[in-house]
Image (cartoon, rainbow, N blue to C red):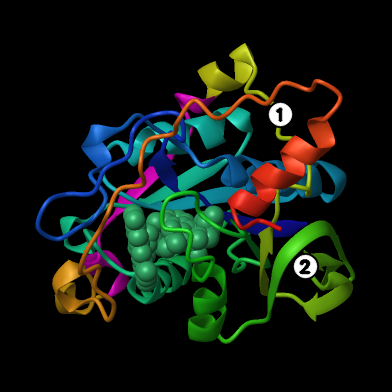
Amino acid sequence: MTNIVVLIKQVPDTWSERKLTDGDYTLDREAADAVLDEINERAVEEALLIKEAQGGEVKVLSAGPDRATDAIRKALSMGADSAVHLNDPSLHGSDAIQTGYALAAALGNVAFENDEPADLIIAGNEATDGRTGAVPAIIAEYLQIPALTQMRKLIVADGKVTGERETDEGIFGLEATLPAIVSVTEKINEPRFPSFKGIMAAKKKTVQTITLADIGVEDGIVGVDNAGTTVISSTPKPPKTAGERLTDEGDGGDKISAYLVGQKII
Ligand SMILES: Cc1cc2nc3c(=O)[nH]c(=O)nc-3n(C[C@H](O)[C@H](O)[C@H](O)COP(=O)(O)OP(=O)(O)OC[C@H]3O[C@@H](n4cnc5c(N)ncnc54)[C@H](O)[C@@H]3O)c2cc1C
């Protein structure tokens, strides 16, 4: 029986336009459609696979504004048992360390039906908006538990989590004793689609909303005004152009190499 918490984040849909707020450069979350980050769907899927194989309970935890409930409901409709939503306006603009600190505090307050603490925390390796890829390791530091990051394969057995970590340098076999936190890559699995039954069941599942006061985090520690890192400027990427078409008249190879040289790619 494994008690699992999956960390899920609602992010702007990659297909909708993203923009930053004038002034403090925090993400303008109202300007874009919001979705459960795809990497977090995979994190939920992995938790469900572990539960289906060996029993246990799967809770999701998200720090986000009111509308993060949509992402939470999606995770519940996939099959997670219940959710904790850390929703506090003081979190606005928190950097990765503040987010990790608040999530670590919230994790200490997650209660399971068997009254035991979490064995395993599963996160995505990198959120598609902030993309610091830092939150899981920061949580590990605050909770003083092992972190296995960038995992493409996981096995939970005998009080340990083992698996494969994939980086540009190669594939590494890792092992840690539980409790531990892991972050997973897109190679970990293919997430299931919520079934109609799952969507209906999700409406009745418990979503516990908590504030910073509930978890003993003072307002002055988090938020954009207290962040250790500050975005001081922002330049949007130039819009995508139509590209350049080269016609192969027997000299296609020469044209491609001349193009690549011109672009300083080779
Ligand atoms: C354009 C932009 C630039 C930013 N630049 C920086 C920067 O340079 N430095 C900085 O410190 N912060 C930055 N931030 C803030 C950053 O987005 C937040 O701190 C964020 O909550 C955590 O960082 P991340 O999204 O990069 O998480 P990552 O570490 O990339 O996320 C990995 C995993 O952690 C979990 N997780 C992350 N956030 C949450 C959450 N809110 N609730 C539940 N689980 C979560 C998820 O499982 C996620 O898949 C930036 C934000 C934006 C929008």
Ligand 1 shows up in which quadrant of the image?
bottom left
In the rendered image of this protein, does residue 25 appear above or below residue 100?
above
The front one of 32 and 70 is 32
Q: Residue at x 32, y 50 (%)?
A: 64
Name the mark on residue 168.
2
Q: Mark 1 falls on what kind of element?
A: loop
Residue 251 appears in view: yes
> Which quarter of the figure has residue 117?
bottom right
The magenta segment is 202-216
Please check the rendered image and state whether residue 211 is part of the magenta-colored stretch, yes or no: yes
Secondary structure state at the residue bearing disc 2: loop
Write the residue at 79% across / 79% down: 176
- Which badge, 2 or 1, comes first in the chain's sequence? 2
Question: Residue 98's spot in the image, x, y percent?
Answer: 33, 74
Q: Nearer the viewer, mark 2 or mark 1?
A: 2
Q: Residue furthest top?
A: 196
Q: Does any portion of residue 110 appear in the rendered image?
A: no
Q: Amino acid at mark 2?
A: Asp
Q: Nearer the viewer, residue 128 or 201?
A: 128
Which quarter of the rendering shows the C terminus?
bottom right
* Amino acid on which the number 1 mark rests in the picture: Arg
Mark 2 surroundings within 10 Å by alpha-carbon count, few (fewer than 14), some (14 through 19), many (20 or more): few
Q: Give whichever of 131, 191 is nearer the camera.
A: 131
Residue that mark 1 sits on: 192
